[in-house]
Image (cartoon, rainbow, N blue to C red):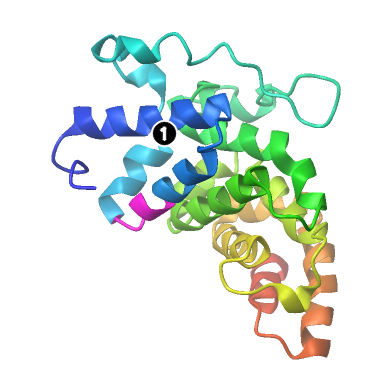
Amino acid sequence: VMVFGMNETESNHLIQNLNNIIRQRLPETYLCCICLMNLTFLENAIEPIIQFSPQNYDLSRNPSLCKSISNRQCHNSNPKNWKPLKGNISNCTVPCLDDPNSLLRSIECLMHEHRPFLMSKILSMEGEAIRWSVGLLRNLTKKERHCSIIAKTDIPSLVLSFVQHSPHQIIRWSKDSLEEMSLTVLGNLSDCEESRNILRLCNAVDVLRSLDEERERLGLNLITARILDSLEG
């Protein structure tokens, strides 16, 4: 924690190690997501984490990482290999979007690949990895410029799907559950014009209106109404 704002080389080294574990899908992946989430409670850690790209990190300083980074393909439940959409990054000068090995793209890839595990009510390391990656996104979406970056990925539609297709009853969406944190991320994204437009294209209004009707019927304290106000305003 002390390295952020004090030693750029050491902070990059830390982020790269965490990113490397996430890309390899090691059992410790969910712990890395928790670590990144906790780091981003620090204001000065948010920018280097969301912008992190190995292209901007001198791997020669840590050659042991070079072997295992980048050649791993990301797959989701579909038979075709998933890759970041070209349309999302064309004419883009943001390295974390252009580099498929960036931390942000690694999180996006993780969500695609592990999404099927969320259909089970059984706790799994894969499901926990998604849960805490959403916890990380909750901290990364507090500023409009960061929401604009995330809007250029599949993350908004993925986060929306986590509440739309949750196997858990809405009454069980407790604090720090995947669904509760996903709603917070959607709320943050709805405050930014670019990501708000993306959510509208993802049919978020219909999804959230259905959830809000259920919330109102049960008398629950969820932020669905506030998100709808932003999307429909």
- The image position of residue 25, as x and y in percent, is 58, 30
Write the residue at 26% across / 49% down: 44
Is residue 41 toward the left or the right of residue 79 in the image?
Answer: left
For label 1, the crowd category at 10 Å Cα-Cα, with few meaning under 14, some 14 to 19 and many 20 or more, is some
Q: Is residue 67 magenta?
A: no
Q: Can you give x and y, in whole percent of width and height, for residue 197 in the image?
A: 68, 52
For residue 110, what is the image quadrant?
top right
Task: Give the residue furthest to the left.
Answer: 6
Q: Nearer the viewer, residue 160 or 190?
A: 160
In which quadrant of the rendered view does residue 229 lie?
A: bottom right
* Residue 68 image offset from top left, x and y in percent: 48, 14
Residue 172 is situated, as x and y percent measured from the top left of the image, at 73, 75
Residue in the foreground of this view, choosing between 71 and 64: 64
The residue under label 1 is which amino acid type?
Leu
**227 on left or right of 14:** right
* Position above or below: 128 against 208: above
Identify the residue under disc 1. Answer: 18
Q: Which quadrant is home to the C terminus?
A: bottom right
Residue for point 65% across, 17% down? 73
Q: Nearer the viewer, residue 231 or 157?
A: 157
Q: Nearer the viewer, residue 100 or 191?
A: 100
| Vertical relation: 31 (above or below) 10 | below
Q: Is residue 159 in view from this perspective?
A: yes
Q: Which residues are magenta?
A: 37-42
Q: Residue at x 13, y 40 (%)?
A: 6
